[in-house]
Image: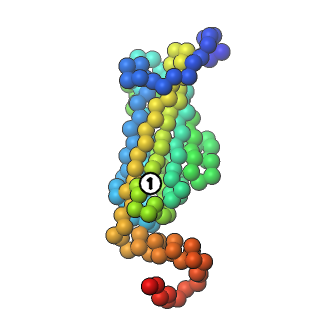
Amino acid sequence: VLGGETGNITNTQATNNEKCLTLATGFSKNPADVGDEVVYAVNYKNTCNSTINSADLRTTLPDQIEFKDSSFKPVILEGNNGLLFKIKNIKPNQEDNIRITVNVAGSNGGLPLEFSSDINYVAGNKIYTEVQNSSLNVGSSGVASLQASILDVLKKLKISGRGYYLLS
């Protein structure tokens, strides 16, 4: 029994005509350098004429990202990379966002860092999922990025301590 109704519930990937919740994501700065603090915003909007009683918003952060804080407390923090937010009573045309503050702890060898957010909700007797992926470019020109890259190499070579190293 969901919302006082009975019946079968099917899992469906929503098409543009029937989805009630839309997602959009963005960053406070893009590109960013290693060591930068960045805000990843996940915006959602109810485009239907009825209230969505509950929705699960899951965000997966790349391995090179450290979670610091968010504007809405996650129900579950899965390691450092998975966040689950339980959102209740999203009224028709209501729009809101969750701001996730992170630290760029490393780069991906010049490739963008991939963030993923999805929202699952019930409308009628169907379960819908809306997915949004975003890429954060990590600059390689900044001093912090260069230092982090050198530290990554030194860690891989198992060289530790402070001092000068000759790299050839």
Q: Is residue 39 depicted above or below 54 in this figure?
A: below
Q: Is residue 133 depicted above or below 80 in this figure?
A: above
Q: Position of residue 7 (x, y in %)?
A: 62, 10
**On the rendered structure, is 138 left or right of 51?**
left
Give 150 or 24, whichever is nearer the viewer. Answer: 150
Q: Position of residue 119 (x, y in %)?
A: 50, 33
For the point 41% across and 19% down, which residue is it? 18
At label 1, counting other C-alpha atoms closer than 10 Å, the crowd grade (few under 14, some 14-19, many 20 or more) is many
Identified by mark 1, the residue type is: Leu
Give 106 or 167, whichever is nearer the viewer. Answer: 167
**On the rendered structure, is 21 left or right of 1?**
left
Q: Position of residue 118 (x, y in %)?
A: 49, 36
For the point 57% across and 74% down, which residue is it? 155
For the point 51% across and 53% down, which residue is it? 62
Q: Is residue 75 depicted above or below 61 in this figure?
A: above
Q: Position of residue 146 (x, y in %)?
A: 41, 73
On the image, which quarter does residue 133 sit in? top left
**On the rendered structure, is 77 left or right of 168?**
right
**Secondary structure found at label 1:** strand
Give 98 or 132, whichever is nearer the viewer. Answer: 132
On the image, which quarter does residue 21 sit in? top left
Give 109 or 64, whichever is nearer the viewer. Answer: 109
Residue underneath mark 1: 113
Q: Quadrant of the N terminus?
A: top right
Q: Determine if residue 164 is in view.
A: yes
For the point 34% across and 70% down, which residue is it? 141
Q: Determine if residue 96 is in view.
A: no
Q: Quadrant of the C terminus?
A: bottom left
